[in-house]
Image (tube, grey):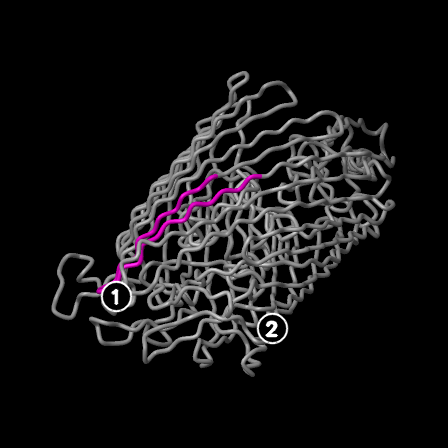
């Protein structure tokens, strides 16, 4: 009996051993380059793997039978293959993936070419897809959160009472960053005030960030870089998203976005409303978040004349009313000493027109935007009120001579006119900037490894003369794992009184600009980066981007204060501002986990007035750690840890470094998603280190803001995707 049982077990185990099969896949792209980190999964199971540094992946211990393998890689068409075992046992299957529609969706608009992000010599960071949705959930009222967590980008709060923020890229003030919407500048000059606080994120398809000078592409203003907000276009399938969000800081936000094509017509509508109750987390009697009501509406109509021609017309409006300062005054219970408030009322209107005609190897486009911005700022015994009318018109001809060469020729006109309603004894600070320019840009594949992008712009301004702005970028693709970019450009910025220093003074007492004391700010800069990606074993991938940058700024505007006369004026610095440093970005993936590590060293030095010091409110060291767990269309969870190093205030007093942590969780269902976010749950805020408001209460002095002022904020909400 024992012999019979042993024989049966032996035969059974032999059968099992015989039924174990293996297969090897070798995945490559059309050029023959191996694809590192391509995913291979067995349909209907949880079994899968990724390709190694040679593009090879292996499956073992497969029983006899039929299996359907799905091979995918970001930016390539998915492939499926059915294999039968034991017929395919120990075979090597070669798979060639073709570039697909997913890659075409990551076409970068900011460079004006039709190339994908992998084939553009200019270094670009794009926030798309699920990452964009996660950032919108963390703060659905504006794009501040989205930009703040990008390496080398600092969101600098300029006012405690208004909550106003500006974006600093690589240590340079916010006025040196140009903010675009669908390639059109809408937020410069006086209209740049409160702009970050008034741009909600729900209608965005992607956010493109270019660091370093790009004045050659878009004219004056993009010395530090540019941010291009690309909106979602209508498709045949309707899209309707509704998002509701509530914060523990007593903020409520509702957003709605709808888009759909109707034959030759298309329509998109975006609406957003936010209500913020005045919030005083440190109990000092002054608001750290102002009482605010904001409403935005952006309808856009598309007309498709034929399959090659598209015309779109849009209208954008934003109303914003915010009051910060003494909590008793805001709540309607003023006292003898409780009189200070800062009130900001603003209106923003803008039209957008875009015409494009594509034919085989050429594209003709025409863009126009006209915007009006009005802001009234009131504090006790002082009122500042003005409006800005701006227009931007551009015509461009793009020629794709071959798959290897692209040309863009364009001309544009900028008008920026500020008019002040003079309610003070000072002369008005009115100005008009009238600028015409032309540019040419070329992208050429020199060979399989080198791609060169070069351009030249010439601008003429009626007050400040001619600006000649060359630029170049070179992309080197050593292989599928290693690439590098190097680039340089010149830039300029026309001077206005609207700087971070002037905002801090409420523009009070600031004299009009004098052409004898002020010239246009100019810059020259460059950057160099290296990208490397590889597979670590069968289930992990590793990628690193190392960037080095340098920007020299000449004729920087410097605000001089005469405290005895309560006056201030601008003049051009007698030396330069030099910003240099590097950024390191590392990504590790394992199964459904993504780990992001980043570090930025930003050394911005003031080399005028014999100062030779680090620029105030600009930390040299910033680091981040983000761990994400994502199951597509089901779960998204993240843990964040950020470090900000020592910095100096405007009196050159050294300030403490600090840490911030956050946790986010999102659960996605077929028609809706729910999310919760614990932002800064360690409750790090500046009041822990020093008072934010100095007496007397009726005429307070606000300290420089160098750390978070709102502390821990919890928010949660729901997003409906009905179509």
Q: Residue at x 71, y 49 (%)?
A: 539
Q: Residue furthest bottom?
A: 610
Q: Earlier in the sequence, mark 2 or mark 1?
A: 1
Mark 1 lies on residue = 286
Provide the secondary structure element on which disc 2 rests: strand
10 Å neighbourhood of mark 2: few (<14), some, or many (≥20)? Answer: many
Range shown magenta: 370-393
Residue 377 on image: x %, y %: 30, 57
> Closer to us: mark 2 or mark 1?
2
Residue nearest the viewer, comparing 340 with 5: 340
Q: Position of residue 171 (x, y in %)?
A: 56, 66
Task: Please state if 660 lies on the left or on the right of 506 as rendered.
Answer: right
Residue 84 versus residue 663: which sits nearer the camera? Answer: 663
Q: Residue 554 carries which label?
A: none
Q: Is residue 616 left or right of residue 574?
A: left
Q: Which of 719 and 196 is in front in this view?
A: 196
Q: Are the residues tagged 2 and 1 within 8 Å (C-beta)?
A: no
Packing grade of label 1 (10 A; few <14, some 14-19, many >=20) is many
Question: Which element is circle 1 on?
Answer: loop
* Secondary structure that dominates the magenta span: strand
- Tell me the residue that label 2 is attached to: 576
Which residue is drawn at the image coordinates 27% and 54% (left, top)? 291
Relative to 339, is 30 above or below? Answer: above
Question: In screen coordinates, is 213 left or right of 504?
Answer: right
């Amino acid at each position: 009996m024992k012999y019979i049982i042993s024989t049966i077990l032996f035969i059974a185990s032999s059968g099992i051993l015989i039924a174990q099969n293996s297969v090897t896949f070798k995945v490559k792209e059309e050029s023959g380059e191996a694809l590192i980190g391509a995913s291979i999964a067995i349909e209907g199971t949880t079994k899968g793997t990724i390709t190694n540094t040679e593009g090879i992946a292996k499956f073992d211990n497969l029983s006899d039978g039929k299996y359907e393998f799905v091979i995918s890689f970001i930016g390539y068409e998915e492939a499926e293959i059915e294999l039968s075992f034991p017929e395919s046992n120990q075979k090597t299957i070669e798979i060639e993936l073709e570039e697909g529609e997913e890659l075409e969706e990551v076409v970068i608009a900011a460079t004006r070419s039709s190339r994908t992000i992998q084939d553009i010599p200019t270094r670009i960071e794009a926030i798309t897809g699920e990452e964009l949705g996660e950032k919108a959930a963390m703060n659905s009222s504006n794009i501040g959160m989205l930009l703040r967590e990008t390496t080398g980008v600092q969101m600098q709060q300029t006012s405690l009472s208004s909550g106003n923020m500006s974006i600093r890229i690589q240590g340079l003030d916010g006025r040196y960053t140009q903010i675009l919407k669908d390639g059109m500048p809408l937020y410069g000059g006086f209209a740049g005030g409160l702009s970050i606080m008034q741009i909600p994120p729900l209608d965005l398809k992607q956010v493109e960030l270019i660091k370093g000078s790009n004045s050659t592409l878009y004219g004056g203003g993009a010395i530090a870089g540019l941010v291009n907000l690309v909106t979602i276009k209508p498709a045949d399938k309707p899209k309707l998203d509704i998002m509701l969000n509530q914060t523990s800081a007593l903020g409520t936000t509702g957003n709605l976005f709808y888009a759909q094509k109707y034959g030759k017509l298309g329509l998109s509508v975006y609406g957003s409303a936010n209500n913020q109750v005045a919030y005083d987390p440190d109990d000092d009697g002054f608001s750290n978040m102002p009482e605010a009501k904001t409403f935005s509406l952006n309808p856009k109509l598309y007309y498709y004349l034929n399959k090659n021609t598209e015309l779109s017309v849009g209208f954008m409006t934003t109303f914003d009313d915010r009051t910060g300062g003494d909590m008793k005054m805001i709540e309607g219970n003023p006292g003898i000493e409780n009189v200070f408030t800062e009130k900001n009322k603003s209106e923003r209107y803008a039209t957008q027109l875009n015409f494009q005609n594509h034919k085989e190897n050429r594209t003709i486009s025409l863009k126009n935007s006209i915007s009006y911005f009005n802001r009234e700022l009131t504090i006790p015994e002082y009122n500042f009120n003005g409006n800005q009318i701006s227009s931007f018109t551009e015509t461009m001809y793009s020629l794709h001579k071959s798959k290897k060469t692209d040309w863009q020729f364009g001309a544009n006109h900028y008008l920026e006119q500020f008019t002040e309603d003079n309610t003070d004894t000072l002369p008005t600070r009115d100005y008009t900037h009238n600028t015409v320019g032309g540019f040419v840009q070329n992208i050429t594949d020199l060979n399989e490894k080198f791609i060169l992008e070069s351009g030249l712009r010439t601008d003429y301004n009626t007050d400040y003369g001619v600006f000649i702005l060359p630029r170049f970028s070179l992309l080197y693709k050593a292989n599928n794992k290693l690439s590098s970019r190097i680039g340089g450009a010149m830039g300029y910025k026309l001077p206005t009184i609207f700087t971070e220093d002037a905002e801090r003074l409420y523009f009070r007492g600031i004299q009009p600009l004098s052409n004898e004391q002020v010239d246009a700010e100019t810059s020259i800069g460059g950057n160099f980066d290296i990208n490397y990606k590889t597979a670590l074993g069968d289930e992990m991938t590793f990628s690193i981007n190392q960037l080095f940058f340098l920007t020299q700024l000449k004729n920087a505007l410097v605000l001089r204060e005469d405290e005895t006369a309560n006056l201030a004026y601008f003049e051009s610095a007698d030396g330069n501002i030099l910003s240099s440093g590097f950024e390191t970005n590392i990504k590790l993936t394992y199964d459904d986990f993504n780990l992001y590590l980043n570090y930025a060293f930003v050394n911005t030095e003031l080399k005028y007035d014999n100062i030779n010091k680090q620029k105030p409110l600009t930390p040299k060291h910033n680091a981040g750690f983000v761990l994400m767990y994502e199951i597509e269309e089901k779960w998204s969870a993240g843990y964040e840890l950020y470090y900000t190093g020592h910095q100096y205030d405007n009196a050159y007093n050294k300030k403490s470094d600090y840490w911030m942590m956050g946790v986010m969780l999102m659960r996605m269902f077929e028609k809706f998603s729910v999310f919760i976010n614990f932002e800064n749950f360690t409750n790090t805020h500046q009041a822990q280190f020093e008072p934010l408001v100095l007496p007397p209460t009726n005429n307070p002095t606000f300290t420089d803001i160098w750390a978070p002022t709102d502390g821990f904020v919890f928010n949660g909400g729901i997003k409906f995707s009905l179509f």
